[in-house]
Amino acid sequence: MVDSGNRQALILGAAGGFGGAMAQELGRRGWYLRLLVRDPARLGRLGLPEDADIVVGDARDPALVAHAAQGMDAIVHAVNLPYPQWDPAMRRITAAAIEGARASGARLVFPGNVYAFGRQDARPLHEEAERRPDTVKGRLRADLETAIETLGREGAAPVLILRAGDFYGPTVRNGLTDMIFARLAKGQAPRWPGPLDLPHQWCFVPDLARLTADLLEAPERLAPVEHVHLTAQLFDTQRRFMEMAAAAAGHPRLGPKRLPWWLLRLAALTDPVARELLELRYLFDDPVVLTGNRLQVLVPDFRPTAPERAIAATMAAHAQDVRPAQG
């Protein structure tokens, strides 16, 4: 275990994919954890330290977040909601996290994504890239990141924005990974809404949590506004990733299937999440590839998990999800 030096972190969204992985990683390292959640029952599967401080409440409440942030070294803003709830909920949650960091001086950690940068036309996306959002979700994400950066530039509190590929891992459950891992766990062929033979970048979330913890434990190396890209796990084809998942599930003959966009358009008539996904089709047709050197500069010894191990761990967690129903 890394000596935490009695460091303390407030995690917003600790029951989610990244928040859960951060809670597990920081807990292993001996950090004192304060977890702000709406439903503490969802924390049971994480195996968190017994002394974790559970605060039940709404992350949109700036007074509650500011109170919970007192004495913290870091605030991890890991809340992510279904697309239809993003506006205004994500704006309010981010504003509350910013006020918590401003009141406490804690470093605000935020997992960014690629939406704010728009279409890249096969250009690698580096850490100093200009934001050029061309979708509703992209403009919202750009607003959130700009507000967080302003906090650091004003000197009110340092900020760390991380960016990586699409999340997967034992704690991650979302529509994208469910099309692969959840279906395979049920003995069904995995699906993908984009071309299967284009590159795709994935992120094993425990790796991102480990990287984030490494960075938080070396604050003297970080700029007041720090951007770090985790550039690992770029697969030459999405087909390869899905074939590896099928092999890990024990179903190597379940080949990946293309999910046609016309079917998603049909689903969008009644499903608001499918409706929001249509706006992101460009990310499947013209994949964004992250690049950058901050990771190598700041934590040169960091090594990501081998894809085979990462995929196997993720598949095992999804298999556990369906096992009680089958038993």
Image: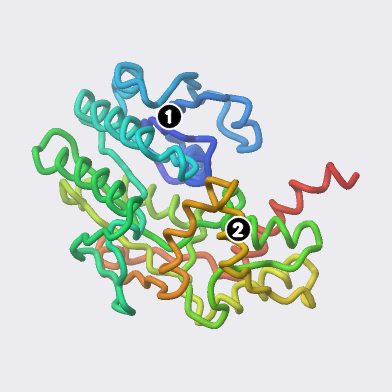
Q: Nearer the viewer, residue 81 or 170?
A: 81
Q: Is residue 98 left or right of residue 287?
A: left
Q: Is residue 253 left or right of residue 196?
A: right
Q: Is residue 257 left or right of residue 323?
A: left
Q: Is residue 274 above or below residue 12?
A: below
Which image quarter: residue 196? bottom right
Under mark 2, the amino acid is Leu
Residue 205 rendering spot, x and y as whole percentages = 50, 54
Disc 1 designates what residue?
Answer: 32
Q: Earlier in the sequence, mark 2 or mark 1?
A: 1
Residue drawn 13% across and 33% down?
Answer: 156
Which image quarter: residue 251? bottom right
Q: Nearer the viewer, residue 6 or 307?
A: 307
Residue reaching furthest to the right: 327
Asked whether residue 199 is in view, the answer is: yes
Q: Nearer the viewer, residue 242 or 45?
A: 242
Disc 2 designates what residue?
Answer: 266
Quadrant of the drawing holding the C terminus: top right
Q: Is residue 226 left or right of residue 3?
A: left
Residue 287 rendering spot, x and y as whole percentages = 42, 73
Which image quarter: residue 165? bottom left
Q: Is residue 9 above or below residue 254?
A: above
Under mark 1, the amino acid is Tyr
Q: Is residue 215 above or below residue 248?
A: above
